């Protein structure tokens, strides 16, 4: 399954749950996760979507660690079952 398909399924699942899965772009600050997920009751998280079996690049791992140190939730999905 391609990354794009997993990402589309994530967006639909979040929408069904009453939330938003906004495409997150950060010009000039590469390596940030693909999606900013906002769910009811103030739950917010970042999601990096990968094709099955692929892992985040080293810079992405660094950005994920930075966000986690700031208290953010960061998830990496490479399978639709993880949604």
Image (cartoon, helix red, strand yellow):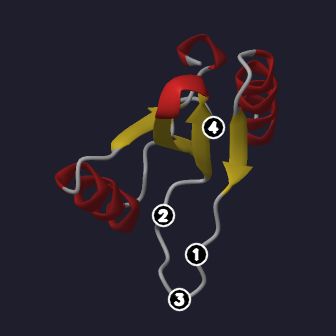
**Please, which residue is most extreme toward the front here?**
41
Residue position marked by numbered label 1 in the rendering: 26
Q: What is the number of the mark on residue 28?
A: 3
In the image, residue 35 sits, relative to residue 16, either above or below, namely below
How much space separates mark 2 and mark 1, taking CA atoms?
7 Å
Which of 81 and 41 lies nearest the eye of the viewer? 41
In the image, residue 14 sits, relative to residue 70, either above or below, namely above
Which quarter of the picture shows residue 83? top right
What percent of the width, then of the height, locates residue 43? 47, 31
Mark 4, Cα crowd under 10 Å, few <14 / some 14-19 / many 20+, is some
What percent of the width, then of the height, locates residue 28? 53, 88
* Identity of the residue drawn at 53% across and 16% down: 82
Which of 74 and 6 lies nearest the eye of the viewer? 74
What percent of the width, then of the height, locates residue 68? 25, 49
Q: Is residue 74 visible?
A: yes
* Identity of the residue drawn at 59% across and 39% down: 37
Q: Are marks 4 and 2 in contact (CB under 8 Å)?
A: no
In the image, residue 63 sits, relative to residue 72, either above or below, namely below
Name the image quarter holding the N terminus: top right
Residue position marked by numbered label 4 in the rendering: 51
Q: Secondary structure at mark 3?
A: loop
Q: Are marks 1 and 4 in contact (CB under 8 Å)?
A: no
Q: What is the number of the mark on residue 32?
A: 2
Q: Are marks 2 and 1 in contact (CB under 8 Å)?
A: yes
Q: What is the number of the mark on residue 61?
A: none
């Amino acid at each position: 399954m391609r990354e794009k398909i997993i990402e589309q399924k994530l967006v639909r699942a979040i929408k069904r749950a009453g939330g938003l899965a906004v495409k997150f772009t950060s010009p000039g600050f590469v390596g940030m996760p693909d999606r900013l997920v906002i769910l009811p009751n103030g739950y917010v998280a970042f999601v990096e979507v990968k094709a099955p079996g692929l892992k985040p690049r080293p810079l992405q791992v660094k950005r994920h660690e930075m966000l986690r140190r700031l208290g953010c939730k960061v998830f990496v999905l490479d399978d639709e079952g993880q949604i």
